[in-house]
Amino acid sequence: MAGARRNAPPREEVLAAAMEMIAERGLEKLTMAALGREVGMSSGHLLYYFRSKDELLLRTLEWSEGRLGTERGRLLAAPTTARERLDAYVDLYVPDGHRDPHWTLWLEVWNHSQSADDDARERQAAIEGAWHRDLVALLAEGVSRGEFRPLDADRFGARLRALLDGFSIHVAIGLRGTSREQVLSHVKEFLDTSLG
């Protein structure tokens, strides 16, 4: 009798392995064959579950965002001032540095979004929407408590996230003169000026 067929690993294990490969080897080394070897599955078996590498990347991003969402929820529920929680939000948003795996994955998914189908675009919008809703709620809370000057939380949140995205891309791609520390300093100065 042939050896017992190995059970397919749980989907979360596959997604965690994909994220780990991106962190250790870079996105260009993440192939279905390499991931299959990592988790003990054939590339065909992976394609059965994920249909394409783009779908695998989007699912990995959703999995990573779920973990970040849990962390974001914990930070935003902390019994501190709205400004302290806003600083924690910014700290979580900005990449850890050049080739941050989460941002590397985000950039790849964004790059493919022009040709993505409606379902993929809606899923991307859901990820963006969660970050935006949390930020708007936090800004509105800060305004209602008198910590922030009166402002349109939705409009200010959209502008702040655009600023964070621009700076974060610079950090993630390793643009010279744009370190994480410099970005956090720029954003702190912008918030001090804008919310006071």
Image: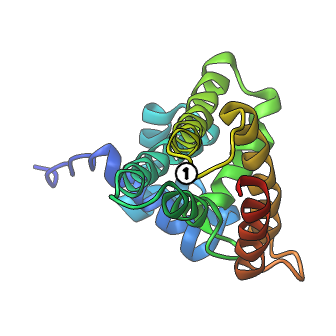
In the picture, the quarter occupied by the C terminus is bottom right
Amino acid, disc 1: Met
53 or 159, which lies in front?
A: 159
Between residue 22 and residue 152, name the one nearer to us. Answer: 152
User: Is residue 122 shown above or below 73?
Assistant: above
Q: Nearer the viewer, residue 106 or 33?
A: 106
Question: For the image shown, how many numbered marks are present on the structure?
Answer: 1
Say few, some or many: other residues with alpha carbon within 10 Å of mark 1 (under 14 / 14 to 19 / 20 or more): many
Q: Is residue 85 left or right of residue 3?
A: right
The answer to whether residue 178 shows anywhere in this view is yes
Q: Position of residue 56 (x, y in %)?
A: 54, 42
- Rendered location of residue 43, percent (x, y): 49, 47
Residue 152, located in which quarter of the rendered image?
top right
Front one among 11 and 130:
130
- At x 42%, y 45%, the residue is 66
Residue 67: image location, x then y, percent? 40, 52
Which residue is at 58% across, 45% downward? 57
For the question of whether residue 98 can be seen, the reply is no
Against 83, residue 61 (above or below) is above
Query: Secondary structure beneath disc 1?
Result: helix
Residue sticking out furthest to the top: 118
Residue underneath mark 1: 32
Locate residue 186: give its quadrant: bottom right
What residue is rendered at 77% in x and 69% in y? 189
Q: Is residue 107 left or right of residue 177?
A: left
Location of residue 38 in the rendering, given as x and y in whole percent from the top left corner:
41, 64
